[in-house]
Amino acid sequence: MALLLTAGQAADSPQFIPVLCKVRVRLPVGRPRAAVAGDKAHSSHANHAHLRKRRIKAVIPEKKDQAANRRKMDSRGGRPVTHDADLYRDRNTVERAINRMKDWRGIATRYDKTPESYLAGLHLRAATIWISSLLKAH
């Protein structure tokens, strides 16, 4: 899990690459076969290009206005963006994790005065969720 604290009015799409760069996948052997799922807010040429460069499968549907602009350009518009619908359904795991983070009132209402203490609370909450999931697995 990677956490990146931004201003409240910051959009999601520009934060996609910085958050992705903070994620590390470690397996015992070989290169991980990775896929990144996101909603339509993350559908941009820059995000798709970054994922292609890192050989990561993008599971991000195309926005309707992007599809219309691509079709308007005929053959110069490129191929349509495809995504795996089954993998896209699993995207709600992240949404549920965010909702579990917000179960703590201090995180949901942002009582902390400094970004550092708020981020520390996010890390603490993420750790408690992770530990409780480990205890449930046994």
Image: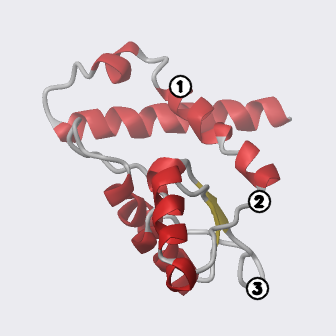
* Point 63% across, 70% down: residue: 80
Which circle's residue, 1 or 2, is located before the other in the chain? 2
Tell me if mark 3 has few (under 14), some (14-19) or many (20+) residues whose alpha carbon lies within 10 angstroms of its own: few
Q: Position of residue 58 (x, y in %)?
A: 63, 67
Q: Residue 81 lies in what quarter of the image?
A: bottom right
Q: Position of residue 2 (x, y in %)?
A: 46, 54
SS of the residue under disc 2: loop
Q: Which of the labelled discs sits on residue 30, or is there none?
A: 3
SS of the residue under disc 3: loop
Q: Position of residue 1 (x, y in %)?
A: 53, 52
In this rendered view, identify the residue nearer to me: 93 or 66: 66
| Residue mark closest to the camera, 2 vs 3 | 2
Q: Is residue 57 left or right of residue 116?
A: right
In this rendered view, identify the residue nearer to me: 132 or 71: 71
The reply to whether the C-beta atoms of the residues labelled 1 and 3 are less than 8 Å apart is: no
Residue designated by label 2: 84
Residue designated by label 1: 99
Q: Which of the labelled discs sits on residue 67, or is there none?
A: none
SS of the residue under disc 1: helix
Q: Is residue 41 left or right of residue 14?
A: right
Q: CA distance from mark 2 to mark 3?
A: 24 Å
- Amino acid found under the numbered disc labelled 1: Asn
Q: Is residue 27 above or below residue 98?
A: below
Q: CA distance from mark 1 to mark 2?
A: 24 Å
Q: Can residue 35 be seen?
A: yes
Which circle's residue, 1 or 3, is located before the other in the chain? 3
**In which quadrant of the rendered image does the C terminus lie?**
top right
Q: Is residue 6 above or below residue 25?
A: above
